Image: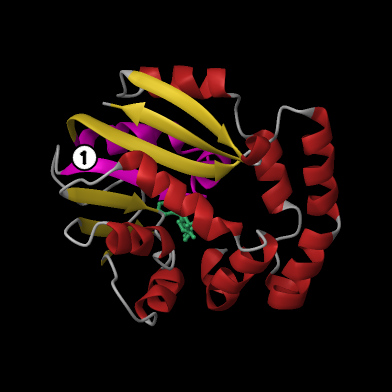
Amino acid sequence: MFSGLAGRYRVFNRLSSLGLDRQWRRTLVENLGPHKRVLDVGTGTGDLAREMLERYPAVQVVGVDVSSGMIAEGGRIKGPSPQWVQASAERLPFVNGSFGAVVSAFVLRNLFMGGILKVALQELSRVLEPGGRLVFLDLTRPSNVFVRWGRGLYGRTILPMIGRSLFGKNWPGSYLESSIRSLPSPQELSELFLANGFIQFECQPLWGGVVSLFIGKK
Ligand SMILES: C[S@@+](CC[C@H](N)C(=O)[O-])C[C@H]1O[C@@H](n2cnc3c(N)ncnc32)[C@H](O)[C@@H]1O
């Protein structure tokens, strides 16, 4: 799906988030702090990795993605870039404990929808060093009824217009909205994290819960 969207993926993000996606990624980077070696899972065109490299130039960032199209698009962007690796989060080509931290933006829902979240968590825990942190950022369903209504209205009206005008027949219809609705609750995610290689889990809603940070510790 993402290879078909790669060419206009970043423009879609900027327009559909009203430019907030960069701010959200920066919040993740600030929350994590500097580390020697960081894995960006589902790096796509490398936007999160780039935020990390701009904030902490000494960090070594490895960006992993299954989509060769997204990686190729990311490789065309000027400026600092991660070390690109094409692989799936289910099976990572790295030795145990090789990263101080794992980060990821807008990928948690994809792992859940693909039915591989449990295996991916085990694999991410395996490549993290003991005490290492994982920080996921993703779109979430606000708990406040008014914020949720406004967000839902936006998702049913303006978002599809932007999607169809940029991607035409490749626009994946209701996938974005249904993946937000389907994401397990913070309590369910906590149980999943604690059962699959993590000793701590925390969910931090941002922007009224339109997005959230999910933080795990190995
Ligand atoms: C919504 S994009 C997010 C890209 C990037 N993280 C960002 O902040 O813009 C989701 C990315 O996750 C990748 N992805 C989906 N499933 C994956 C998996 N099992 N392993 C690695 N990457 C995956 C997709 O190819 C896509 O590039």
The answer to whether residue 149 is magenta is: no
Badge 1 is on which residue? Answer: 127
Q: x%, y% of residue 102? A: 30, 43
| Residue type (three-letter) at the residue carrying disc 1 | Val
Figure disc tally: 1
In which quadrant is the C terminus drawn? Answer: top left
Q: Is residue 84 left or right of residue 176?
A: left
Relative image position of residue 121 (x, y in whole percent): 36, 33
- As displayed, is residue 99 above or below residue 130? below
Of residues 155 and 193, the one nearer the viewer is 155
Q: Quadrant of residue 31?
A: top left
Q: How is the image coloured?
A: secondary structure
Q: Is residue 43 visible?
A: yes
Q: Residue 153's spot in the image, x, y percent?
A: 85, 48
Looking at the rendering, which quadrant does residue 119 occupy?
top left
Q: The magenta stretch spans which residues? A: 99-128
Where's residue 133, x and y in %?
A: 29, 34
Is residue 90 visible in the rendered image? The answer is: no
Residues packed near mark 1 inside 10 Å, few (<14), some (14 to 19) or many (20 plus) = many
Q: Is residue 83 above or below residue 155?
A: below
Q: Please tell me which residue is depicted at 34% across the width and 60% down the height of the picture.
A: 49
Q: Is residue 211 left or right of residue 33?
A: right
Q: Residue at x 71, y 27 (%)?
A: 143
Residue in the foreground of this view, choosing between 114 and 182: 182
Q: Secondary structure at mark 1?
A: helix
Q: Which residue does the image show at 27% across and 65% down from the upper left?
A: 82
